[in-house]
Image (cartoon, rainbow, N blue to C red):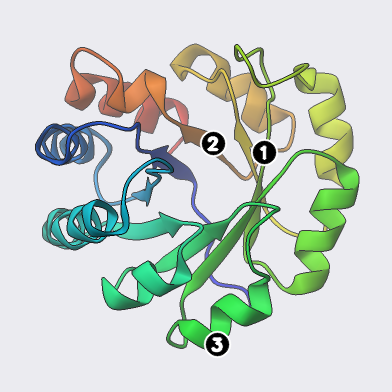
Amino acid sequence: MRRAAPRLLMITPELPTAELLTRVDAALRGTGPEADVLLRLPSAADGVLMDAALRLRDVTRRRGARLLISRRADVAALANADGVQLPESALGVAEARRLLPDGALIGCSRHDSAGLADAASQGADYATLSPIFEVPGKGPALGLARFAELVSAARLPVLALGGLHAERIPATLAAGAFGVAITRALLGASDPETAGRGLRREARL
């Protein structure tokens, strides 16, 4: 049985933990608890990642939001997070479920039709599909037409990721996205709370 997939997923940039917590807290004031937070610190040492996860768990709990951890199901379990998002090179969904409590949310990061089919066959609760718009260093953008084609054939909820900001959300949802995943336009904004309000409005939360 699939758990409710995110409608608005804020993905953390790599920042010092104190600044990251401040920005997430401000963003959640704008989005409200309907947004979910994905902690993604690929360069962090284990101790730094664990500390950030535990402290971010306090922030998200206070704001009533769910916390997901990128790649590390073990960290998600130890931090009492709500789930994990798995890159294609990470462990499988079944292995992650063995590490996490019942009811944990498991998403997968994917980039094409084969990846979406694989995520669905593994029993993932959702997948992100990227890049929908141009992002430096992330390869060719899918574009809305190709994104719509892939989503229409998918057998699980799909979140759009890559180059998104508030003005692009309505067209992305109209193309079939279940939700959107945002980094720079939210936690990289000069005012994350105001940015959160705009994104919440456009995401129809």
Q: Amino acid at mark 3?
A: Arg
- Mark 1: give few (<14), some (14-19) or many (20+) Cα within 10 Å: many
Question: N-terminal of the two: label 3 or label 1?
Answer: 3
Question: Nearest the camera: 17 or 181?
Answer: 17
Location of residue 132 (image quadrant): top right
Q: Nearer the viewer, mark 3 or mark 1?
A: 3
Q: CA distance from mark 3 to mark 1?
A: 29 Å
Mark 2 residue element: strand
Between residues 187 and 148, which one lies in front from this camera angle? 187
How many numbered discs?
3
Instruction: Inspect the image, locate mark 1, and give the three-letter code of the amino acid beneath it.
Output: Ala
- Residue at the image point whose x is 11% and y is 35% from the top: 22
Left or right: 170, with 32 as reference point = right
On the rendered structure, is 26 left or right of 140?
A: left
| Quarter of the image where the N terminus is located | bottom right
Residue at the spot x=74%, y=59% of the render?
A: 156
Return the residue at label 1.
Answer: 177
Whole-number angstrom distance, CA of label 3 to CA of label 2: 27 Å
> Residue 180: which disc?
2
Q: Quadrant of the C terminus?
A: top left
**Residue that mark 3 sits on:** 98
Residue in front for this viewpoint, 92 or 120: 92
- Image spot of residue 104 (x, y percent): 46, 76
Label 1 and label 2: CA atoms lie apart by 7 Å
Q: Secondary structure at mark 1?
A: loop
Q: Is residue 165 left or right of residue 52?
A: right
Tell me the quarter of the picture where residue 94 sits: bottom right
27 up-or-down from 137: above or below: below
Say whether residue 104 is visible: yes
Rendered image: mark on residue 189 = none
